[in-house]
Image (tube, rainbow, N blue to C red):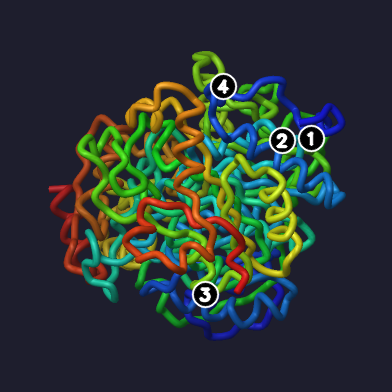
Amino acid sequence: MTRALEHWLRTEHTAFCPGCGHGILMGCVIRAVDELKLDRKKLLFVSGIGCAAWIPSPNIKADTLHTLHGRAVAYATGAKLANPKLTVIVVSGDGDLSSIGGNHLIHAARRNIDLCVICGNNQIYGMTGGQTASSTPVGAKTATDPEGNRYRPFDLCAVTRAAGAPYAARWPVTRPISLVESIKKAISINGLGFVEAVSPCPTQFGRRNRFDDLKSLYDYLVGLCVTREEAKKMKPEQLWERFVIGEYDD
Amino acid sequence: MSGEAQILMGNHAAAEGALAAGCTFYAGYPITPSSEIMELLAERLPANGGTFIQMEDELASISALVGAAWAGARSMTATSGPGLSLMMEGLGYAAITETPCVIIDVQRAGPATGQATRVASGDILQVRHGSHGDYCPIALSPWSVQEMYDLTIRAFNLAQRYRVPTFVMSDEGIAHLRESVRLHRDFEIVERNRSIESPPFGTDAPDGVPPMPAFGDGANLLVTGSTHDEWGYRRVDHPEQHARLVERINRKVLDHVDDIVEVDSRYLDDAEAVVVAYGFTGRSALSAVKQLRTEGVKAGLLRLITLWPFAEREVRALDGKAIVVPEMNRGQVAGLVRQQVCGGVVSLCQTNGEVIEPAAIVDKVKEALA
């Protein structure tokens, strides 16, 4: 992040572990709102509980609402409807938005509430110690699946699009320019825009899956990414351990 | 009192009270026996410039309520036992973030689904203790359709004055009763202090209520359900910050009982036996007391209009008299009364989904005096 963007911060340090991708995602979020020249006074960040929920609170200097686990989208819905002049951006994690909070996400998409929802997907419950999430790839080891996850993960972009959101996109944090552009689109469209950032968690995911250095974890995640075109040629079950990247705008 | 008398259902009077009190936001989920409140507001609130939304469940309802309050709304919901149970975590969030909101709980027979269409008052202790940790909501208990209107208005004002979730603890009996009510305008509307100059989560007074700006006011608010300092920064490993916050959010209510606690005293001056009652049961209790008086029994009534904070001083003043507490539960308020007096307290419990008849209270008072 450049010094020119520091006016968006109210902290000098984040709580993120070394190698965590959420700092890159935070930079992308800030760059997006800065490039859109949004009025800080009319900008509200809402987050749930988890590592990604700490991206806006307390780091970003604007109104922030750090809520209960899973309920960020419901709080955001109330705030947006009560004051439609607010630009409301939800930033939270995969467990928060899709496991405990999945119902609120699909209903906000169904209602097409004018929110930008950003999911920092680290494939695991980072803050609580590395348990399986509804986004954990099949086969990945966690504190609660020591033999490897058996159940297919959600494709949250497909879920939100199917529920009614007009725009969804997924990028790894190694593609920050694409992330910034997608976040800008998700903020600007009229309705619910959803952006998922595939973000590495060296502390919980990397450690349990034997990635001894950061580069090998990043290489692993990037290696799991396939474009939407490539995904069309693959069997559905092959995608359970992949990340389909790109814009879900068709 | 201004306003023409008219016949209304209790739930509709509560909705009228909300509109009169300046409610601008309703989020809720349908549940018997409260749904008439949301149905009337679905029609009337948007017409008044407010916002109505039916959410996907009660977890979402109380969350939307709090989000809307921070965005500047005067927000409310209505529910019943099963929905209230789902709202408990959100209640704690509203308490620690000091968010004004109004929750009308139309009580029905529980636990669980219980008897959805039958009357009870089984939620008294739940609103006080149902969410984890220490917090102190305000709860009011109407006994008439008129009080459904009046106490809903009062609930909005108390919520704003003390920045605290405030309950109107109705029951199926009052909610579906139809009787005369005046939709008067003889009240003031309390607006919250939206100053951005002082910290929004702390004051120098240990029982103080800080100002609460809204999103969009330029305060760069940091609102969190974690322990926080006066500007909202998380302080999750700081013993003094936690104690200070928890003490203040309780004391700002408990130290102001003179303003908040309201009781209705009848025939108490010379009473030898006192019935302590609330909600629909207060009607039966008054009827019983009047009958006892005609029989020469010196009976009186202490009706609790405010349930939380509890009317400790008023109940303590009854010590030495025979006390009977009729309730549509297993003695939730009787236990609170026992904490305040040394003498015996007779609990008249009824958990059959029916209202308590005056005759049962008359018999119990005579038993207590014997």
Asked if both marks, 4 and 1, belong to the same chain, the answer given is: no
Q: Disc 3 versus disc 1: distance between alpha carbons?
A: 40 Å
The label on residue B38 is 3
Of labels 3 and 4, the one closer to you = 4
Q: Disc 2 versus disc 1: distance between alpha carbons?
A: 6 Å
Contact? badges 2 and 1 (CB < 8 Å): yes
The label on residue A117 is none
Q: Residues within 10 Å of mark 2 (few under 14, many from 20)?
A: many
* x then y, percent, for residue A151: 27, 53
Is residue B286 visible in the rendered image? The answer is no
Contact? badges 3 and 4 (CB < 8 Å): no
Q: Is residue A113 left or right of residue A244?
A: right
- Please report, as a chain letter, where disc 1 is located: A
Q: Disc 4 versus disc 1: distance between alpha carbons?
A: 22 Å
Q: Which residue is mark 2?
A: A60
* x then y, percent, for residue B128: 39, 43
Q: Quadrant of the N terminus of chain B?
A: bottom right
Q: Which residue is mark 4?
A: B235
Q: Which residue is mark 1?
A: A8
Q: Disc 2 versus disc 4: distance between alpha carbons?
A: 17 Å
Q: Between A124 and B152, which is closer to the camera in this rendering? A: A124
The residue that appears at 28% across and 64% down in the rendered structure is B120
Of labels 3 and 1, the one closer to you = 1
